[in-house]
Image (cartoon, rainbow, N blue to C red):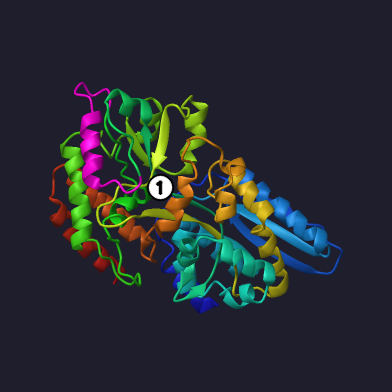
């Protein structure tokens, strides 16, 4: 294990998470189940909001109803990056308090697998009827995201994806038909130009400069920032360059505000944008702010070479070092039970990882009208590119795009430079 820890320490500066993770209560707070002196203990390493910490605590309580002799300690870590999370994991392990069950984000999954920290779950799932049934209900895209070399290392507990939201009233006022699934990049740009007002009060689209939010543009152009096996960057491929050229065309046509400095979600809520890409996480804020079904809706991402989107999220995994495998499996089952998945989705942020829950309007709500289109986006999406050198590729790509949008470099030159930088960094 010491060898594994040294490998982890060499990569703990891996990049920032897709999601901005709020502090989950007190970082030292532990949720304990009841114990009857049997001496068996399970440790859970979690992250997220205080509400998500409590959801896990509720699942632990249900586990303890069936296993009253087991003490369960939950440590919920407030983090800004996966390096913080991995460092906490290392500290717990080297101090003799290694976690048995871990909630791991997609961005850290390959790093953990590469360092042999996670237990493959395939035989466990195949040998348990309830987990086998659940496995069949997950979106296949999500299972693929938490699989490495054909082995499954995590059971998803929630996800995020991207669709294109649009202001129906602005389309109506401009005499433009609402977009439909399968619309093209050219149709999107034409609409964006028509919806942009010359006085700068309304832009046709709000381009975000965030790594996750940009990804659907690569996906729908049949491009990916890494090779298929994640072993090397592929940032200057023909299709990646073509996608960046299209984004730059938008900025030069001034159909979007400055991608680097603009808060596009607030601008959409205040009716300064006709279109913006997002997932489910924005809906509560927008609805609370007064946007209604009469005013906005969503559609799949515009297509150039293929249909697609992006997804991120988290999954519950089991540590390879657990000494209580059977109990860890039972706890894992409670943490991915339907009751727990519903509770995760109830906050309005996460998209449930199974079709039955993600297409249930009692869970997902009814605003906007095409809310169930979010599930379709999950099923056609690719995982956000998160190799073990995630920090290098994310930071390099965003820096290169800033140089493009500011006019300092052409797309091909900027991506060539970033490709070289990342290649050198991972050597």
Quarter placement of the N terminus: bottom right
Q: Under tag 1, what secondary structure?
A: loop
Where does residue 207 sit, x and y in percent of width and height?
29, 40
On the image, the x and y values in percent for residue 6 come to: 47, 73
Residue 111 is situated, as x and y percent measured from the top left of the image, at: 45, 67
Q: Nearer the viewer, residue 69 or 25?
A: 69
Q: Would you say residue 255 is visible in this rendering?
A: no
Mark 1, residues whose alpha carbon is within 10 Å: few (<14), some, or many (≥20)? many
- On the image, which quarter does residue 279 sit in? top left
Residue at figure coordinates x 71%, y 58% from the top left: 73
Q: Is residue 291 visible?
A: yes
Q: Residue at x 62, y 64 (%)?
A: 134
Residue of label 1: 162
Residue 420 drawn above or below residue 241: below
Q: Quadrant of residue 32?
A: bottom right
Residue nearest the observer in this picture, 352 or 97:
352
Residue at 61% in and 59% down: 45
Total numbered circles: 1
Residue segment shown in magenta: 181-202
Is 191 magenta? The answer is yes
Left or right, residue 268 beside residue 193: right
**Could you say which quadrant of the image residue 424 lies in?**
bottom left
Task: Answer whether residue 195 is magenta in the image.
Answer: yes
């Amino acid at each position: 294990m010491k060898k594994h820890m040294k490998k982890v320490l060499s990569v703990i500066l891996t990049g920032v998470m897709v999601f901005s993770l709020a502090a989950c209560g007190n970082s030292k707070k532990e949720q304990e189940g009841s114990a009857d002196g049997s001496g068996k203990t399970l440790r859970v390493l979690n992250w997220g909001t205080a509400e998500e910490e409590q959801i896990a605590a509720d699942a632990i309580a249900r586990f303890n109803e069936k296993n009253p002799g087991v003490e369960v300690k939950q440590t919920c870590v407030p983090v800004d990056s996966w390096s913080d999370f991995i460092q906490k994991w290392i500290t717990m392990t080297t101090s003799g308090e290694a976690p048995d069950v871990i909630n791991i984000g997609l961005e850290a999954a390959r790093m953990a697998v590469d360092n042999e920290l996670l237990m493959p779950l395939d035989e466990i799932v195949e040998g348990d009827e309830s987990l086998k049934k659940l496995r069949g209900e997950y979106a296949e895209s999500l299972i693929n995201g938490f699989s490495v070399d054909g082995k499954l290392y995590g059971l998803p507990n929630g996800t995020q994806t991207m669709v294109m939201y649009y202001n129906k009233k602005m389309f109506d006022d401009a005499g433009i038909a609402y977009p439909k699934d399968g619309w093209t990049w050219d149709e999107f740009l034409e609409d964006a130009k028509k919806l942009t007002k010359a006085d700068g009060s309304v832009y046709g689209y709000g381009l975000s400069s965030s790594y996750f939010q940009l990804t659907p543009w690569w996906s729908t152009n049949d491009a990916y920032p890494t090779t298929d096996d994640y072993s090397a960057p592929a940032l200057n491929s023909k299709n990646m360059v073509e996608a960046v050229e299209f984004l730059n065309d938008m900025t030069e046509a001034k159909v979007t505000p400055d991608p680097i400095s603009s808060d596009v979600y607030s601008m959409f809520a205040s009716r300064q944008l006709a279109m913006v890409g997002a997932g489910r996480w924005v809906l509560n804020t927008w609805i609370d702010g007064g946007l209604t079904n009469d005013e906005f809706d969503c559609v799949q991402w515009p297509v150039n070479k293929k249909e697609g989107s992006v997804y991120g999220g988290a999954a519950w995994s089991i540590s390879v070092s657990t000494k209580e495998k059977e109990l860890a499996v039972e706890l894992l089952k409670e943490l991915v039970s339907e009751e727990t998945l519903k509770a995760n989705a109830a906050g309005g942020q996460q998209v449930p990882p199974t079709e039955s829950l993600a297409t249930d309007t009692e869970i997902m709500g009814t605003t906007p009208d095409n809310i169930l289109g979010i599930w379709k986006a999950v099923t056609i999406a690719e995982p956000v590119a998160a190799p073990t050198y995630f920090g290098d590729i994310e930071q390099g790509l965003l820096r290169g795009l800033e140089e493009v949008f500011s006019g300092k470099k052409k797309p091909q030159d900027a991506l060539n430079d970033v490709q070289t930088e990342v290649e050198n960094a991972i050597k």
